[in-house]
Amino acid sequence: MGKKFGIEFDGMDQLIERMKKLEGDVKGTTEKALKETHSIVTKYAEISAESQNLPAEGRFSTGKTHDSVKRKAEVEWVGTTASIDTGFDIAHGGLPSIFMMYGTPRYMKNQKMYDAFYSSKTLKEVQKAQEEIFYDELRKLE
């Protein structure tokens, strides 16, 4: 379980147009920003999957959920739209993350796991990192 992230911040379209006019590497910058996004979210996902943060204080933890965190940042392009997949690999031990992220009748949701992907703190940190990467690249061109 996890979330796909793209690039979104105010003024992004205008910034990309300026980069294109200056013959900047928009695709490379986009990939760099998405990989940084993956790094930020993965850091929080790993923390949320540590034993002490799991239901029953990790009493039943085998480490599979923690090991299933997607650590490889792969940018996916569909036409001109790029995204990056973050979270847990369901096929390789990440299935419990779904139940932990949203809770079950027996256990409350793992708020840290949910927040790793959806909290305003995480989203603001991602947005700020993306903006900084794009503006840094633009400054190099000007």
Image (cartoon, grey):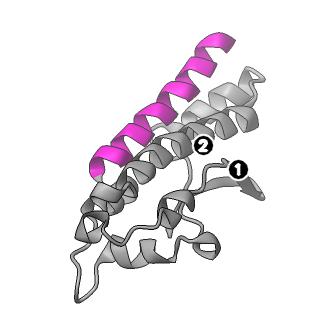
Q: Amino acid at mark 2?
A: Leu
Residue 13 % position (x, y): 57, 41
Q: For mark 2, give the secondary structure.
A: helix
Q: For mark 1, give the secondary structure.
A: strand
Say if the magenta span includes residue 136: yes
Say if the magenta span includes residue 133: yes
The part of the chain drawn in magenta is 120-142
Q: Are marks 1 and 2 in contact (CB under 8 Å)?
A: yes
Principal secondary structure, stretch drawn in magenta: helix
Residue displayed at 47% across by 41% down:
40
Q: Is residue 119 visible?
A: yes
Q: CA distance from mark 1 to mark 2?
A: 7 Å
Pick whichever of labels 1 and 2 is earlier in the sequence: 2
The residue that mark 1 highlights is 75
Residue 35 % position (x, y): 62, 40
Number of labels in the image equals 2
The residue that mark 2 highlights is 34
Say which of 41 and 134 sits in front: 41
Determine whether 62 is above or below 50 in the image.
below
Residue displayed at 21% across by 76% down:
108
Q: Is residue 142 visible?
A: no
Residue 41 lies left or right of residue 52; in this view the side is: right
Res 67 → quadrant: bottom right
Residue displayed at 67% across by 26% down:
19
Q: Which mark is residue 134?
A: none
Residue 46 % position (x, y): 44, 50
